[in-house]
Amino acid sequence: MDFKDYFEKTPGLGILATADSEGNVDLAIYSRPHCIDDGTIAFIMADSFSHRNLQSNPKAAYLFKEDGPGYRGTRLYIEKTSEEKNSPLIDEIRRKKKSAEDAEAKDRFLVYFKINGTRPLTGDLSGTP
């Protein structure tokens, strides 16, 4: 699948699942990922539970449900590879303009992930969970 094309053109809702080193899980709504290259995506993150969990456990999952009827979408099994704090690239790649809240916001992180596996949104017991 061409993730860059898919995530640029497909509207929908995304949920990022992370867990800390003790297995405590957090779920958060996240925008579509930014596709850096084949097999690498990035999210812009605040200093949140999701970001903190990734400090002790780099593995996560991202579920994306396409807008519309039914259950079309994808699941990505991802692993953090690096991050940049307050990177100038954040302003270059963000899809929406900065709000007044963003202008006053605290630190932002550009967090990079490699894609370890994918599965459709529903069904398919093969692949990587």
Image (tube, helix red, strand yellow):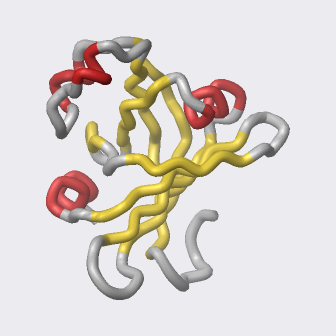
Residue 116: x percent and y percent? 52, 52
Q: Position of residue 124 (x, y in %)?
A: 54, 83
Q: Is residue 116 visible?
A: no
Residue placed farthest to the right in the image?
Answer: 22
The residue at the far front in this view is 100
Q: 13 or 19, which is in the foreground?
A: 13
22 sits to left or right of 123: right
Above or below for 65 versus 95: below
From the viewer's side, name the closer residue of 38 and 48. Answer: 48
- Expressed as whole percent of the image width and height from the top left, the position of residue 10 reads 21, 64
At x 30%, y 22%, the residue is 102
Q: Image check: 7 left or right of 74?
A: left
Left or right: 99 as drawn, with respect to 13: left
Q: In percent of the image, x 46 and y 50: which residue is there?
A: 29
113 versus 88 height, above or below: below
Give coordinates of residue 31: x percent, y percent.
34, 48
Quadrant of the rendering where the C terminus is positioned: bottom right
Q: Is residue 79 above or below residue 9?
A: above
**Does the image show residue 119?**
yes
Q: Is residue 29 above or below residue 36?
A: below
Q: Quadrant of residue 79?
A: top right
